[in-house]
Amino acid sequence: MMEKYLNLNDVKEIRARSLIYFGCGAIQKVADVARDMKARGVDRAIVVSSPSAYKKSGAWPTITAAFEAAGVEYVLFDKNRPNPEVEAIDEALKVAVEFGAQGVVGIGGGSPIDAAKSVAILLKNPGKTAEDLYSYAFAPTEAAPILAINLTHGTGTEGNRVAVASIPAKQHKPAIAYECIYPTWSIDDPELMKTLPKTQILYTSVDALNHAVEAATTTCSNPLAITLARETVKLVVDYLPAALENPEDMVARYNLAYAALIAGISFDNGFLHYTHALEHPLSGVNPDVIHGCGLGVLLPAVLKEIYPKCAAVLADVLAPIVPGLKGCACEAEDVAKGVEKWLFSVGANRKLTDEGFGEADVPKLVDLVFSTPSLTALLAVAPTEATRETVEKIYRESLAPMN
């Protein structure tokens, strides 16, 4: 609804822990950032991206022109892939060290920006590897300055202190959260998101929805996390169908980008629990599982588990999806089915069996939840007791549709 009283082309400064330039045309602010980088002593930077997004989005010419005008030299590492792996981060680090990079730029969605955050830490911790970082072999307190240029409306990583990477040899997909990796500068330009395929429009938005629901229901949630979660859900429900129907709809893209950003800030405050803890093993075992898809698969069963404990807040937050809730524990199954029905209505209609997982895979997935670094920390703030039996039940109830 913000388009009623805000000009979509008026770039705003949103100050969280990062300075975020938000709005259509925000990519032009990269000129200011490049000058600021130079003033802070960053003469050389590594740019971390995926093979094509930085070009397809149209951002690259503006970025390179800004860096050249400011006198910031750069080297490009564009081998990042979805669900970034520690080996690729180490490869990017090698390029950065050989180039003499003093700053890091991440261009893309959560994967390249998270990889850029990881490189930024490792630049300040010589001798450490990405596996060391994601195995919690050390706790960093420093990172090189980070510029996050976000090209999707999903992760919120441009506004928080979180990063994720996979350790394929162990089938682990841990998360890290350190104060030193809040991006110094971030750019959220909805104009750059027009080239997102419909699948990514859908599943990045489902990712944001999950961030909101989880952040509002952890044991460490707070009023800010809940307020942002409520707004996130409303915006996703109101604008995702329009963006799917017409990817050029900038009102829809603006609102989804804002929803993703505030959802990222919401879980930076409220943290996450079951849905992310149980999704990470899915894409850790099979990197082809789209993160947002995995979250959508699990969300109904997670809601069925937690609703009795969080009925009041979820009745409020989920009102745009399941109207008329009273906040009674007895509504748990209806809420789970209602959310699954909405997910299916927008095209997020896959379950675990569709992603190649069956009954026989459940014990292994449960083991990974409890053995992957960081995931037990998420379970520790779940609103119900996160036993192996509870986790197993959620997986089993996610194998096939509830409706």
Image (tube, helix red, strand yellow):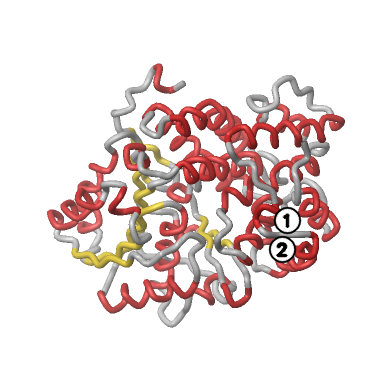
Please name the residue shown 64% across and 53% down the image. 276
Please name the residue shown 40% across and 47% down the image. 18
Q: Which residue is mark 1?
A: 379
Sequence-earlier tag: 2 or 1: 2
- The one nearer the camera, 332 or 145, is 332
Please name the residue shown 63% across and 43% down the image. 215
Q: Are marks 2 and 1 in contact (CB under 8 Å)?
A: yes
- The one nearer the camera, 355 or 322, is 355
Image side of residue 302 versus residue 317, left or right: right
Q: Amino acid at mark 1?
A: Leu
Q: How many marks?
A: 2
In this picture, is 385 found above or below 137? above
Q: Nearer the viewer, mark 2 or mark 1?
A: 2
Residue furthest top as drawn: 4
Spatial CA span between label 2 and label 1: 9 Å
Question: Can you give x and y, in whole percent of width and height, for residue 114 in the image?
Answer: 46, 59
Local SS, label 2: helix
Tell me if mark 2 has few (under 14), some (14-19) or many (20+) residues whose alpha carbon lies within 10 angstroms of its own.
many
Local SS, label 1: helix
Q: Which residue is mark 2?
A: 369
Q: Amino acid at mark 2?
A: Val
Q: In the rendered image, which quarter contains the C terminus? A: top right
- Residue 337: name its quadrant: top right
Question: Can you give x and y, in whole percent of width and height, for residue 180 in the image?
Answer: 45, 60
Residue furthest bottom as drawn: 127
Image side of residue 313 versus residue 21, left or right: right
